[in-house]
Image (cartoon, helix red, strand yellow):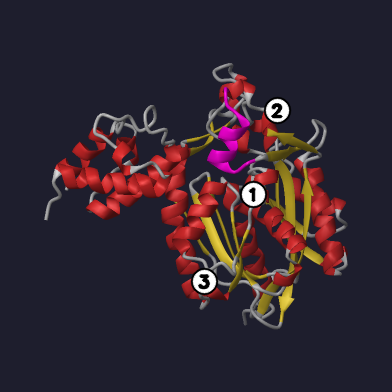
Amino acid sequence: MTATLTEATGAQHSRIYAMGAARGENVVPNADIIEPIDSSDEWIQKRTGVITRVRADKDTTAIELAAAAAKEAIERSGIDPAEIDVVIMATISNPRQTPSAAAIVADRIGATPAAAYDMNAACAGYCYGIAQADALIRSGAARYAVVIGAEKLSDIIDPTDRSISFLLGDGAGAAVLGPSDAPGVSKTQWGSDGSKSELVGMNGTLTQFRDGEVEWPTLRQEGPSVFRWAVWDMVKVAQKTLDEAGVRAEDLAAFIPHQANMRIVSEFAKQLGLPESVAIADDITTTGNTSAASIPLATHRLLEERPDISGGLALQIGFGAGLVFAAQVVVLP
Amino acid sequence: MAFTNDEVLAGLAELITDETGIDASEVALEKSFTDDLDIDSISMMTIVVNAEEKFSVTIPDDEVKNLKTVKDAVDFITNNQ
């Protein structure tokens, strides 16, 4: 007789226990970056909302930022790091393709032998990670999970680029998730559209660079087209996320979209018709756009500034290169 | 019912005022969106999306780059209703 396999069984619900954050050591004001792009502090603030961005020292890596953010999240969660079963690191800026950053981070935070892997979903990476952690916990594949968004984007920018480089910063944000008695993560709305892959991304490949065909590859975007997609297409995704979660806009304590550009954040909030009671994340104004790290960093900051929203509902949505997107409603730790 | 050129110009001027605060009387056919009206690419895209809804037309991203003057936009909208 053939043996019957034993399947994993997981928790009924998952939730975020705690957040952690680490930002680049250096605050870079607009005045420091305007010369190569022939711009001004006023122009950048008016058109993007960015006043400063944070950038890491040359020798600081995304792995170090990730480990620092994860350690804070674990300490705040009260979970023994040895009990963590999986470490998911969303990043697009790890300059070493293998080994994964996540495996090294897992070891540095005391989680070995947790499963660990890197994931590339650009600015949607953190929300992809939350979707995966929630599914892993509820399936029984993991009891505790760490999701990290970590970037050192300053390694892949061109100071003369006027399309995106001047917005970008370095940092890492992390969340610890585990089992819950009540729902803490809604169904995720996620997807991709590779037909628009050329709208945002690297302007060359490593093999082209090796062969002397291109300069060191850096990030570029078609700003207006990305803006249109990020607001009007993503509003539909956000609304569907709310609808399928059974949540109305007025039920939200916070709206935490990817911190791409303050004008995207503002127009998005306007199109969603959010009431004034909803706190809107604006971490981009002083941190800059940190891709996969932007949502957890913005969440961490919002909870520091507005501890009263702890336990409330937050709509978070990431969108970016791929194109890819992911959104869910979470209960704030 | 199709919009006339004058109706499109007036409607576009309203959308430009809403987005930028520029007085509608400033919006004339020969004006350049960037050089005369100082409308940046993000505001331009917001105006385009709102114009699509107002005039029931589709203005693809590639076409937006060709809309240099108010007349370019009015012509595109009236010809594609």
The residue where tag 2 is placed is: A32
- Name the N-terminal-most of marks 3 and 1: 3
Three-letter residue code for mark 3: Ala
- Which range is magenta? A38-50
Do tags 3 and 2 sit on the same chain?
A: yes
The secondary element bearing badge 3 is classed as helix
Give the letter of the chain under mark 1: A
Q: Amino acid at mark 1?
A: Ala
Verify whether residue A44 appears in magenta. Answer: yes
SS label for mark 1: helix
Question: Residue A182: x percent and y percent?
Answer: 67, 82
Q: Amino acid at mark 2?
A: Asp
CB atoms at circles 3 and 2 under 8 Å apart?
no
Residue shown at 59% from the left, 70% from the top: A277
Between A46 and B50, the one lying in front of the other is A46
The image shows residue A206, relative to residue B63, as above or below, that is above
In this rendering, is residue A18 above or below A210? below
**Residue found farthest to the top:** A212
**Location of residue A189 in the rendering, given as x and y in whole percent from the top left corner:** 50, 64
Q: On the image, numbered disc 3 is attached to which residue?
A: A249
Left or right: residue B78 compared with residue A110: left
Q: CA distance from mark 3 to mark 2?
A: 39 Å
For disc 3, the chain is A
Q: Secondary structure at mark 2?
A: helix
* Image height of A61 relative to A178, above or below: above
Nearest to N terminus: mark 3 or mark 2: 2
Measured Cα–Cα span from mark 3 to mark 1: 25 Å
Disc sitting over residue A292 in the figure: 1
